[in-house]
Image (tube, helix red, strand yellow):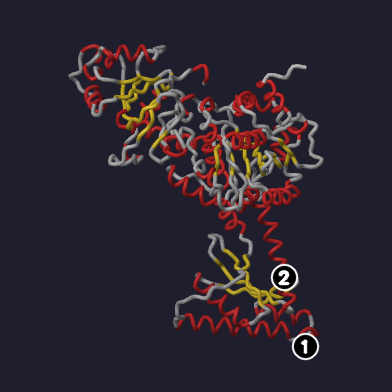
Amino acid sequence: MAPLPHLLQRRFLCQKTHTTNKWKTVKQVTKSNFADTLSDLKIHIAESDFIAVSLQRTGAVSAPWHRVLPFDTPDTAYSKSRHAADRFQLLQFAVCPFSITSASKLRAHPYNFHLFPRDELKIGMPSYSFSCQTSYLTTMAKEGFDFNACIYDGISYLSRAQESAARVRIGNPTAIPHVVKSSSKPSVADAVFIERIKSRVKYWRNACKDTSSKTDEALVRSLRKIVLGSEEHGSRPCINIDVCSERQVQLVLEMLEEFSDELVPLIIPGKGGAAQEVRVILTSSKEDKVLFQKELQNIEEEQNKKVRGFREVIDLISASQKPVVSHNSLNDFTFIHSKFLAPLPPNFDEFMCTLRLVFPHVLDIQQLMKEIGPLRKVTNIPTAISYLKDHFFAPIDMEILHEDTVNEGKIHGHNVLSISHLFAKLCSILKIAPIQSDNKNLVPALEKYANILTPCSLSPQESTDEDIRVWTNNTRKVNCEHLVFLWGFKRGMTAGMLKSLLQGSHDVFSKEFDVRLVDKSCAIVVFWKPGLSETFMDLISSKEICGSLGEMVSEGLRAARYGTYKKVCRLGILEADLARSLDKALEEPDCLWQGDSETNPLEVYWYSDSIINFDDL
């Protein structure tokens, strides 16, 4: 028998890495099995080297130009993603802890969590109204997504910021495990307050321990409790001490720590969140005190699970400090920050600073894909996997380690397995050994790909906060000050037609320049000679403009600098047409926003082959 052709051999050998059943072992998690799943996930995260994530949203962009484009700076790209994260909602969140062995074996534990925000604590949070795009919901319906199960059995959650606010509203007592003594010297008023409270607590404690009083009649015991101010916390006696300031809380806690080993203090918050009183509970012995503290800890853990909901998963990922692998990470992590951490900060730098505190290592597989020339423009995961199968011999043996989780119905969240598989295959092709020696540091070969969230980065080695890059065959660096947006031209005009009209309209276009369409209503012009963009802007606003350029202006041609486009993105003026957004931005007073300093101009990369194909949008 003749040997198989080399390419056919390569395809045949690569095909053994997947079977249909393996993709059915993504564990589906809802509110009914969330608690049991959480303990398993914690173990799998601890045993794995990486964690892949994939999100299912109710929408993303409402118009083609709302996507991150080649000429976007990190701030404009972030502003677009922030706007989407604030508008739309997450309905599914897939998580896959995985490891890659030296034998190209992928060991994965995929989970798909179904989410739905609801006010389970009856405190007005989270109070959500969110947008949905019909195209996204239609796609989910075709894939068999059960919207009823999502709404009624989806897992709710609160962000960290919402949890802090919720605890104030709920007003549960807070245990103080350790008291840090104040360094300031007590004043005379402090000394009087301490002695008064100490005397009251001592008298109350002695009365509670007085065994002779237990034989008194019920009425006498009730009167004694009223006089002493004694109450009960469960089955244990307690007394409440009113406080007027955090200083008095500190004084009470220090006094109780020195006073007796049998007393346990709890902070009772008021409506505004500040301490209203200190509740002192009397335990019967040191053993009873340990038992009571354990009870408080269990109550707090149960309350935390109820308050945090799905955010427990986010906290587990964060606490592990493991590298998080994503695809289109800017969009994913703006959603994660908005829904599970806190409201998104106003600019990209603050966002990245906050994000790194929670997720120190984020790996976007798009950055690894750019190392393989033909994949530089590919954004579709199945297309990338298919290309690698056809052109590289890099078999990955995937082992999915869930037991008894093969689902009979529709499978959701399998994209997280594709991300894990593509990451492993890219590491194999690029000769990267991704085995982690510890949890806190990436292997050196992966460090250069970490925390690059903007998808238009030219290369990991050259990544800076001031550059926007995408992969194309022909790139030139251009300062944002040399870019001008044009709109008001005739509909249906191509970039070539517009460039031809401009070339003969005025001497300012006698030097080298380029034109690209942003959408059907607006174009962007780059002047390669410094200073010509300023000349053009002065010219188009001049009353003395004449010739064919003057005719175009009289027919409605308008122009704006890159700063206006940044204003559009920062203020979220995201109309269907960019032209309409630029018009609105020019009408807004400049006091509503603060642009970047003129002394710190930004640079982007211009791509001679990046004409937008509207059929692809």
Residue marked by disc 2 = 292
Task: Determine whether 35 is above or below 301 in the image.
Answer: above
Figure label count: 2
Q: Secondary structure at mark 1?
A: helix
Residue at the (27%, 17%) spot, across then down: 553
Indicate left or right for 475 with 236 as reference: left
Callout 2 crowding tier (Cα within 10 Å): few <14, some 14–19, many ≥20 = some
The disc at residue 558 is none
Badge nearest the viewer, 2 or 1 = 2
Indicate left or right for 446 with 409 as reference: left
Question: Split into 4 quadrants, where in the image is the N terminus?
Answer: top right
Residue 35, image x, y percentages: 74, 49
Mark 1 is on which residue type?
A: Ser
Q: Secondary structure at mark 2?
A: helix
The disc at residue 212 is 1
Closest to the observer, 457 or 332: 457
Residue at the (44%, 81%) spot, across then down: 187
Residue 463, image x, y percentages: 43, 39
* Residue at the farthest left position: 544
* Residue at the farthest bottom position: 212
Q: Give the Cα separation between the discs numbered 2 and 1.
A: 26 Å
